[in-house]
Amino acid sequence: MSRLFPCIERHSIRYRLFRLIVVAVTAALAISMVAGAALEWGNKQEQTRQSLLTIADAVGVAASAAVAFHDGKAAREALNIMAARREIEAAAIYGLEGALLASYGSDAGLPRTVDAGHEHLPAFSLLSPVTTLLQPIRLDDSTIGHIFIRANLAESRFRFLLQAFLVIAVNLLGLALVLGFGFKSLDRIVKPVKDLADTARQVRQDSNFSLRAAVAAGDDEIGDLVISFNAMLAEIERRQRDLAEYQGNLERLVLERTEALHATNRKLQAAKEAAETATVSKSRFLAAASHDLRQPIQAINLFNDALAKTPLNEDQKRISHYLGQSTRSLGDLLDALLDISKLDAGAITPTLETIDIYALFGSIDAEFAALAAAKALKFRLHFPPGEMALYTDGKLLQSLLRNLVGNAIKYTQRGGVLVGIRRSGDQAVIQVWDTGIGIAPESIGRIYDEYFQIHNPERNRAKGLGLGLAIAKRLARLLGSDIACRSRPGRGSLFEFRLPLVARDAATGDAGDEATPAPAASPAGRHVVVVEDDEMVAQALTLSLGTFGLSATAYGSGEQALADPRARDAYAYISDFQLPGMNGVQFLEAVQQRTAGPIRAVVLTGDTSPERLEVAHPTWKHLFKPIDLAKLLAAIEDQASG
């Protein structure tokens, strides 16, 4: 199109509008010409067909008597009627039997015989000028013969084609006139748009918003567009002036904001220092609470254990039982509060190592099987076949499982609790199932909130503080996992989390390095050294050990115990970690250096901070206060003989 009209640019709006006009007008004219030609050709066909049928009927009527009497001469005279029709090249009349009776024109191409099955009307084609027809000759409604006509329509076809050519020529001339007029009319549309585009380009290049586009004559959309564009330029120019005015005061504004930012930074620094001070104070409080608050609970617990071994009447036994329950509840509440505080303070960091899952589940079974049996609940552990080990923090994982299993037993009144583990790719899925009261769907999202408890609106402290799942959630995140819960009210709950598995060969190698402790002899009559700076706790330990037939000697410090020769060959050593002078681990190391073989030793501590756990000895047991005497004796007997 641009080659035909060089003034039209390929991508201009003028080109698009002109192309639209050309396509629309050409399509309209083409449709009109095709439709007109088709109608004209149809009319021509119908006229020719009627003309041939009329002359065939006229000849048939004129020759009917000749056909009836087989008069060939009379039949030829009837055919001479067609001499007035130049388009008829040949014609023939046939008798009843189909034999040729008379002919007109050229005999070439005339059929020698015909029958009723070959009757047909004339057909027309632009490709062939010749057409034929075969019609019956009737007399008194009976067929007595046939008439055949062959016509050459070349002249008629030529007139039709000439007429069509003239129509096409006229339409093309009209198309040219329309396109020329349309091309001239495009300037009224394109020029204002082009002027607007040129103005916009100049504004962009020069950043001169004072320029204005010329308003087009006429009240139309293009005029509205130009007016709106000029209004936009005026608005931008006004805002540019305002911006220049603001920039004049920018330095003052920046200075004011900088001073405000410095003041805010000073406040943030002060708040940070205050937070760090609070964190240090909280850590000190946790350390003090871990030791000092557990000491009296430890003493009460041990005194009650000793009291339970003495002859008591039924009322005294009941009081001792209630006292033990209250002491354990108090210890559990204190543990929960301290654990949640340490987790929130970031005082606990995981130490990753290879953990034998079977040993871990064995400790869970030893701790909770009796508790479940006391409630007449089934307690089951499910292990997959083969070796299995985890790469995680064993102490944190055990604490996480203890919270989940303890919570399951607490809220299950009948049925049982199942603790299982299964492989899922390179991870282990650990699950705790119970048949307890279940959790309503609307409460699933709240069970990990602190102090939230289901079915405990009266806040019965015997049921805990509602911190178990909050602690479990934080522990799972420390281990790089998360707890998922599915539950149905009245049917039970499922809690699960995932941890990375260790390769089978590594797990087998690690498991093979562990030695099985030799069974210990009965401790009755043996001498036990107790190192405890709290006199009340020392007396409670001495008295409690005596109820099991052990002879206990208490010392207020490690140095005092080392100075006594009787402490050298003791059956076992029980030492508090936090002592005046050397700590409990240092005391036991000094004893170990003076003794030929390994010693039985238990370190008691109320501080579970990472700093304390780092100095833990791999051989000696570490128990966290408050403890009961059964756990203490079990820890002693689990160690190899000295």
Image: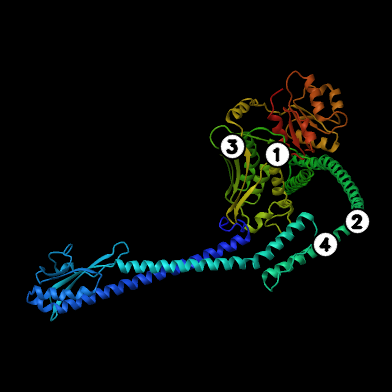
Q: From the top left corner, tell me how far across and down residue 221 is, in percent.
A: 67, 70
- Answer left or right for 410 relative to 547: left
Q: Mark 1 or 2 closer to N-term?
A: 2
How far apart marks 1 and 2 lie (CA) works out to 62 Å
Residue indicated by mark 1: 396
Task: Place residue 379 in its image quadrant.
Answer: top right
Q: Indicate the secondary structure of the residue bearing disc 2.
A: helix
Q: From the top left corner, tell me how far across and down residue 295 is, in percent.
A: 82, 40
Q: Are marks 3 and 2 in contact (CB under 8 Å)?
A: no
- Answer left or right for 632 relative to 428: right
Mark number for residue 239?
A: 4
How far apart marks 1 and 4 lie (CA) works out to 63 Å
Task: Place residue 52 in its image quadrant.
Answer: bottom left
How far apart marks 3 and 1 lie (CA) works out to 21 Å
How far apart marks 3 and 2 lie (CA) works out to 65 Å
Q: Could you say which is closer to the camera, residue 336 or residue 192?
A: 192
- Amino acid type, callout 4: Arg
Q: Mark 3 or 4 closer to N-term?
A: 4
The mark lying in front, picked from 1 and 2, is 2
Residue indicated by mark 2: 248
Q: Mark 1 or 4 closer to N-term?
A: 4
Q: Which quarter shows the C terminus?
A: top right
The mark lying in front, picked from 3 and 2, is 2
**Above-or-below relation of 568 to 453:** above
Residue indicated by mark 3: 426
**Above-or-below relation of 52 to 422:** below
